[in-house]
Image (cartoon, grey):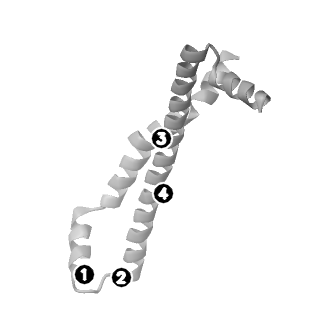
């Protein structure tokens, strides 16, 4: 029981760490490419002759990076909101002797 709760409670941290430590850095390294190719592509781009396939590849790499960063942002906000809710619940318990959920339920019953 405790192990399943631990696994279910920590999935957001595992995904965020995987994204931050492995997926995003390796994706950025993949996007860097070969230095000689980069110089050749830069010269072609300045001349306005960069092939469409290369432009599409660069566009897709950038979109994937934005997606990974947005996913990391969402998961971080989810984790932060859970941490904040836990903090507010503990503070509510210290002030009222009831956990936040109990306090909210009690107020709903009165209304």
Q: Secondary structure at mark 3?
A: helix
Front residue of this view, candidates 101 and 103: 103
Is the residue 101 above or below the residue 49 in the image? above
Mark whose residue sits in front, 3 or 4: 3
The disc placed on residue 67 is 4
Real-space Cα distance between discs 2 and 4? 25 Å
Q: Secondary structure at mark 2?
A: loop
Instruction: Of the two numbered discs 3 and 2 on the same chain, state the one appearing first in sequence.
Output: 2
Instruction: Of the two numbered discs 3 and 4 on the same chain, state the one appearing first in sequence.
Output: 4
Q: Position of residue 94 (x, y in %)?
A: 54, 14
Instruction: Of the two numbered discs 2 and 4 on the same chain, state the one appearing first in sequence.
Output: 2
**For the residues bearing labels 2 and 4, Cβ distance under 8 angstroms:** no
* Residue at image point 51% right, 47% down: 74
Instruction: Of the two numbered discs 2 and 1 on the same chain, state the one appearing first in sequence.
Output: 1
Residue on which disc 1 sits: 44
* Quadrant (top left/top right/bottom left/bottom right) for the C terminus: top right
Real-space Cα distance between discs 3 and 2? 38 Å
* Label 1 Cα neighbours within 10 Å, binned few <14 / some 14-19 / many ≥20: few
Real-space Cα distance between discs 2 and 1? 8 Å
Instruction: Of the two numbered discs 4 and 1 on the same chain, state the one appearing first in sequence.
Output: 1
* Residue at image point 30% right, 59% down: 32
Front residue of this view, candidates 44 and 84: 84
Residue on which disc 3 sits: 76
Instruction: Of the two numbered discs 3 and 1 on the same chain, state the one appearing first in sequence.
Output: 1
Q: Position of residue 20 (x, y in %)?
A: 41, 42
Residue on which disc 2 sits: 51
* Quadrant (top left/top right/bottom left/bottom right) for the N terminus: top right
Real-space Cα distance between discs 3 and 1? 39 Å
């Amino acid at each position: 029981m405790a192990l399943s709760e631990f696994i279910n409670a920590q999935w957001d941290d595992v995904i965020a760490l995987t994204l931050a430590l492995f997926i995003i850095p390796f994706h950025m390294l993949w996007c860097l490419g070969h230095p000689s190719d980069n110089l050749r592509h830069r010269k072609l781009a300045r001349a306005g002759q960069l092939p469409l396939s290369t432009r599409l590849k660069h566009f897709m790499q950038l979109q994937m990076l934005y997606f990974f960063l947005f996913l990391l942002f969402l998961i971080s906000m989810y984790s932060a909101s859970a941490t904040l809710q836990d903090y507010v619940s503990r503070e509510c318990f210290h002030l009222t002797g009831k956990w936040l959920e109990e306090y909210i339920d009690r107020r709903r019953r009165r209304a």
